Amino acid sequence: MVCTIRKWRLSDAADLAAALSNKKILDNLRDGLPYPYTEQDGAAYISAILSADENETFAFAITVDGKAIGSIGAFRQGNIHKQTAELGYYIAEGYWGKGIMTEAVKQLCAYVFEKSDILRIYAEPFANNTASCRVLEKAGFRYEGTLRSNAVKNGNVVDMKMYSLLKSEALS
């Protein structure tokens, strides 16, 4: 199944709401997203992304056959980490296990490294999210270690794993 990443469109709000109104997805994301996630929530998010600084926020819809099925973004960090970006992503449950996310991660990293001065992209999936860890590994990210008791999600203290991809590795 072929996927592409593209800029968000306001017309994607319904697809975004459909994907994010799923507890299985929200359980693997950071807190702060409403549940259920409405089309209005989607439109507000898309508007914010479209008005964000394109050299700080690299955020795209993941699409299959023109339909937005998920979201992927790399977000520039600050201060001494200004050439580092944090990666975040999700796709609708019906598209899990098909290699789509690995391909989207590769596309996003290539874009960020080509279009910016970012030197390092990292991700911190929950340690129990083996599918997300596998996506990163298949996309060429290196496992750097486990961040023990690094977060509280759904009332549970959880470990997170640190993965990174360097520009020098991606271009070699």
Image (spheres, rainbow, N blue to C red):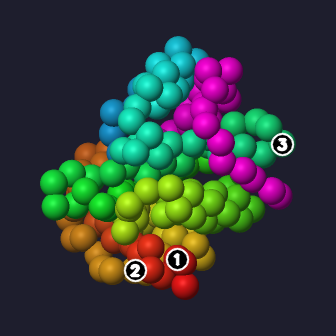
User: Does the rendering let one see residue 115?
Assistant: yes
Using the image, determine if residue 37 lies above or below residue 32: above
Mark 1 or 3: in front is: 1
Task: Specify the segment rendered in magenta.
Answer: 1-26
How far apart marks 1 and 3 lie (CA) works out to 27 Å
Estimate the spatial distance between the alpha carbons at disc 2 and disc 3, rounded to whole Å.
32 Å
| Residue indicated by mark 3 | 65
Q: Which residue is mark 2?
A: 143
Q: Nearer the viewer, mark 2 or mark 3?
A: 3
Q: Nearer the viewer, residue 70 or 85?
A: 85
**What type is the residue that disc 2 sits on?**
Tyr
Check disc 1 and give the amino acid type.
Answer: Ala
Q: Position of residue 153 (x, y in %)?
A: 30, 49
C-alpha span from label 1 to label 2: 15 Å
Q: Quadrant of residue 39?
A: top right
Reading the image, the residue beneath label 1 is 170
Magenta-colored stretch includes residue 102? no
First along the sequence among labels 1 and 2: 2
